[in-house]
Image (cartoon, grey):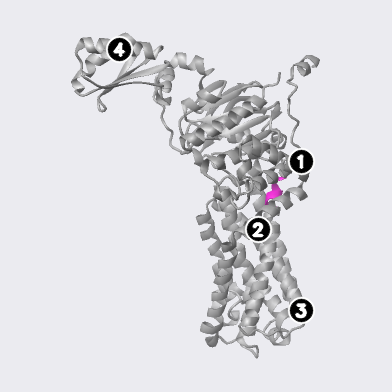
Amino acid sequence: MTPILEARGLVKRFGKTQALAGMDLVVNPGRVVALLGPNGAGKTTFVRAVATLLRPDAGTLRVDGIDALRKPAKVRQVVGLAGQFAAVEEAMTGRENLEMVGRLFGLSRREAKAAAVRVLDQMQLTADADRLVRTYSGGMRRRIDLGISLTGTPRLLLLDEPTTGLDPGSRIQLWDAIRSLVVSGTDILLTTQYLDEADRLASDIVIDHGRVIAAGTPEELKTRAGDDMIEVHVRDAGHLRAVSGVLATIGHDPRVDVGARRAYVAADDGSRRLMDALRALDAEGITVEDVSLRRPTLDEVFLALTGKPAQTTGAPEQEAS
Amino acid sequence: MTDTLALAPSRRAAVNPGAGLWVSSLVVAGRMVRKFARTPQLIVFTTIQSALFLLMLRFAFGGAIGTGGSLSYVNFLVPGFITTTVLWAGMGAATGVAEDVEHGFVDRLRSLPIPRAAVLVGRSLADAALMVWALAVAAILGFAVGFRLTGSISGALAAFGLCLVFGFAFEWVFIVMGLVGGTAQAAQSMGLMITPLVFLSSAYVPVASMPGGIRQFGEIQPLTPMVNAVRGLATGPGGQALLEHSTGYYVGLSLIWAAAIFVVFGLLAVARFARR
């Protein structure tokens, strides 16, 4: 089976910044892969290389078996791209935007009209199809942007931070739209800064920092990073040492943040261990201001997997063009 | 090989063939035309601006400017004003292209299976249509402030056609500025760099009235033969009397300039656009 995406030793530099530092990634068909990493980790650079918008300095890159460095025009026939910015024409309606790109994908006028109807339905935008995009909300813009790539039939859909900057409601709607694509069998590579987004959408998560730091299914990665975080806030920073001692019995390697008067630890079965922690804290006579059970943040996953915090490199992501 | 084929998922999508140069250029041009039609402020304000500019030259400065011949200043000015309209109108292309780069629209088009030149060709076609409009408005304004055609009708039409040709050539200069500028603001500042070209030409004042070095620049730069050609065609003997060479000479020279500008900046634009 030809991998839908095969990158070997991909390198791209912008001046002194190394956006891709020997990226290796093989994606088989039928998968939804999330590239998870902080700003400046080179995620956008990688997507732009796959979309043939920029040329890597070194390494090989094959999309659906096609050499992206030698035959970029062929690659463009099999990929679809939805970017960080909703790249739609504001002075046109949603339907017109879809028909326009459908025509550019090589559809006849009639086929483009039919494709627009299909995509509008898929993105739940039929009711707003004939309004100018400049009157759309941010979430609707992202959905029409996503839909535009689907007027063609991409084998690999590239989604660069599809929900960055959206309100929670719009995010969930967009997630639904992306999931419906997964069901219909489109292979997807998406980039995100949000652990929960990768978790909800992807069958594989790749932790990316210019090169692959860790990869696996969401379950595999979370097992390695700890499933839940138990976090304890105290009123008196002097108690933190004792709290840390209690947390060490709950999970592995508790961390203390003196400035915020809190200590936290990763635990595998959070809700049950939370009760244990409360009993132990009570037994120690420690006054607790607040206790919470939460998902690990991207930073914490990084810390767990690499031993280093997720640092942002110098250049902001958008300038990497 | 047979095994691999059998394993391949049956739902496998066909490749997208992509549109050819002609269809994709027209589709891109169609988008621009809709954008202009639905964003009237783009056109209305450039029109008002150009009208104010003409009124200022004609009535505030005009009295102090001698044409160096029997031609009245309004008949001297209006052909120059119409010619330079293509530059003022074309400047919008620099900001428009830069906005498309800035907002990812160019990336979207570059990721599609279409000839990359189509994006630029489509843009220039739409802008040419816009330029016809701007030229027509400029001509009407010209007559309104007192311009009278003293040349032949066919000469006037030829002058109009020449302006379109110049506009199409300069369009590629502005496209390059938009691609290089990358943001609307930067592109606008770059676009304004053509201001010296406009003022240090024979468009609004006779080049002969300029001092030494500036005068030399005014004589050799491309806009002067363009303006001279248009003026000669539109005003007949009165305008021709001011020219050092025949009108035909300036028509020829200006067309050579236009072709050179088109080739150089067209290639630059395509190279810059295809770069990755």
Q: Is residue A269 above or below residue A192?
A: above
Classify mark 1: residues with Cα within 10 Å, few (<14), some (14-19) or many (20+): some
Label 2 chain ID: B
The amino acid marked with disc number 2 is Trp
- Name the residue tied to disc 3: B155
Q: Are marks 1 and 2 on the same chain?
A: no
Say the numbered circle drawn on residue A277: 4
Of tags 3 and 4, the one toward the viewer is 4
Residue at x 43%, y 22% (from the top left corner): A302
How much space separates mark 3 and mark 2, taking CA atoms?
Answer: 27 Å
Compared across the picture, whether B133 is left or right of A108 comes to left
* Magenta stretch, overall SS: helix
Q: Residue furthest bottom?
A: B70
Instruction: Specify start and end residues of the magenta stretch as a single range.
Output: B114-120
Location of residue A28 in the rendering, given as x and y in whole percent from the top left corner:
65, 20
Quarter that holds the C terminus of chain A: top right
Location of residue A67 in the rendering, given as x and y in whole percent from the top left corner:
69, 30
How much space separates mark 1 and mark 3, taking CA atoms?
Answer: 47 Å
Asked whether the beta carbons under mark 3 and mark 2 sit within 8 Å of each other, the answer is: no
